[in-house]
Image (cartoon, rainbow, N blue to C red):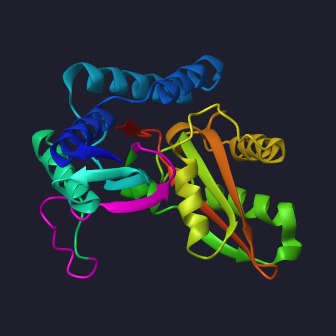
C-alpha cells in the first residue's frame, strides 16, 4: 500500500491549477499555429495571431489566459493500493483549488444557481473519481469556462437514427453555437451509456491531446469526419469566418441500452486549459 501525504497532494494540485490557467498546452498552441499557417481569410489570420500573442503574454507575465478561469473540474484515477495520509480526496482537491485561485488571482466564478450569490472561493469543485488498479493517483484538471459550457447539448436519439443522426446533432449543435463558445473550439462527443454518462464521456474526451485519435479505428474515422463537417460550417475564429471553426473533435463511446442512443456534445473554447499530475 502506497501512502501519499495530503500536503504533497495539495501542493501538486495547487501548482497544476495555476500553471493550467496561465500556460496554454503545447498541443493547443501548436494547433493554433497550424491553423494560422493554413488560413486564407485576413480577419481569421488576425484573430489567430492575437490568440497566439495572448498565450505568449500569459506565459511570460504569469497572468491568466482568460478572464473566465471557470469551474474547477477534476477527473481522478484513484489507485486501489493508495491511501491519502492526513486528509480525504475531496477536501484536499477543494482546499488546493481555493489556494490556487486566491494565490494566482484567478477569477472565482461559482455562485448559487438562484440567488447568484458568489460562493467567494470558487468552491465546490466538480470531482469525478474512479478506483483503478495500482498504486498511483492521477489527477486531471480542467478550467471550464461558462461561455463554451453553455453551448453544450445532450440528445436522446432513437437508435434507428444511427451515425447520420449523431453527425447531424453534433454539426447542428456547433452551427447553433456560432461565435458564442469563442472558436476555434475543441469538441468533445460522448456516445452511448446513459443520460448522465454521455456528457461525462464528452468532457473526458476533451482531455485527450489534440491530434491524437481514438484507438478504435472506427471511432477515429468518426472524429475526422465530424471535424471536417464542423469546419465546413465556416464560422471561423471568433465567428468572423474562416477555415478553422474547431481545432479538433474527440469522441468517446460506451455501450448503451438497446432502446437508447444518448449523445452529448461538450464544447471547449480556444483557451483549452487542461493539465494532470501523477503521484
| Along the line of sight, the residue nearer the viewer: 122 or 135 | 135
Tell me residue 104's x, y (percent): 15, 39
The x, y position of residue 176, in whole percent, is 61, 61
Quarter of the image containing the C terminus? Answer: top left
Tell me if 35 is positioned left or right of 114 in this view: right
Q: Position of residue 141 (x, y in %)?
A: 37, 46
> Residue sitting at 18 percent across and 44 percent down?
100
- Chain part drawn in magenta: 113-137
Q: Is residue 77 left or right of residue 213?
A: left
Taking the image as drawn, is residue 107 in sight? no
Q: Look at the picture and state if 177 lies above or below 244.
A: below
Residue at 42%, 44% (x, y): give it: 135
Q: Nearer the viewer, residue 98 or 91?
A: 91
Q: Residue at x 65, y 44 (%)?
A: 249
Magenta segment's dominant SS is loop
Membership of 23 in magenta stretch = no
Image quadrant where residue 120 sits: bottom left
Image x and y of residue 247, in percent: 60, 36
Asked if residue 236 lies left or right of residue 91, the reply is right
Residue lying furthest right in this view?
160
Count of numbered circles on the image: 0
Of residues 190 and 77, the one nearer the viewer is 77
Tell me if 145 is positioned left or right of 91 in this view: right
Q: Is residue 223 visible?
A: yes
Amino acid at each position: 500500500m502506497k501512502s501519499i501525504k495530503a500536503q504533497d497532494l495539495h501542493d501538486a494540485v495547487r501548482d497544476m491549477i495555476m500553471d493550467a490557467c496561465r500556460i496554454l498546452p503545447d498541443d493547443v498552441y501548436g494547433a493554433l499555429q497550424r491553423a494560422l499557417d493554413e488560413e486564407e481569410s485576413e480577419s481569421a489570420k488576425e484573430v489567430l495571431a492575437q490568440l497566439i500573442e495572448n498565450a505568449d503574454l500569459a506565459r511570460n507575465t504569469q497572468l491568466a489566459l482568460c478572464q473566465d478561469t471557470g469551474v474547477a473540474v477534476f477527473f481522478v484515477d484513484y489507485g486501489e493500493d493508495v491511501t491519502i495520509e492526513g486528509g480525504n480526496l475531496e477536501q484536499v482537491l477543494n482546499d488546493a483549488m481555493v489556494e490556487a485561485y486566491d494565490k494566482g488571482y484567478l477569477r472565482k466564478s461559482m455562485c448559487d444557481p438562484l440567488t447568484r450569490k458568489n460562493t467567494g472561493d470558487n468552491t465546490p469543485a466538480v470531482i469525478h473519481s474512479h478506483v483503478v488498479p495500482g498504486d498511483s493517483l492521477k489527477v486531471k484538471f480542467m478550467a471550464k469556462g461558462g461561455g463554451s459550457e453553455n453551448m453544450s447539448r445532450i440528445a436522446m436519439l432513437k437508435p434507428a437514427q444511427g451515425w447520420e443522426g449523431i453527425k447531424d446533432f453534433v454539426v447542428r449543435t456547433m452551427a447553433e453555437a456560432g461565435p458564442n463558445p469563442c472558436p476555434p473550439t475543441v469538441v468533445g462527443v460522448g456516445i452511448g451509456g446513459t443520460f448522465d454518462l454521455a456528457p461525462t464521456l464528452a468532457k473526458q474526451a476533451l482531455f485527450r491531446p489534440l491530434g491524437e485519435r481514438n484507438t478504435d479505428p472506427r471511432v477515429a474515422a468518426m472524429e475526422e469526419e465530424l471535424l471536417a463537417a464542423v469546419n465546413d460550417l465556416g464560422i471561423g475564429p471568433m465567428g468572423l469566418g474562416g477555415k478553422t471553426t474547431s481545432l479538433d473533435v474527440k469522441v468517446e463511446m460506451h455501450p448503451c441500452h438497446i432502446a437508447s442512443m444518448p449523445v452529448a456534445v461538450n464544447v471547449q473554447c480556444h483557451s483549452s486549459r487542461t493539465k494532470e499530475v501523477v503521484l
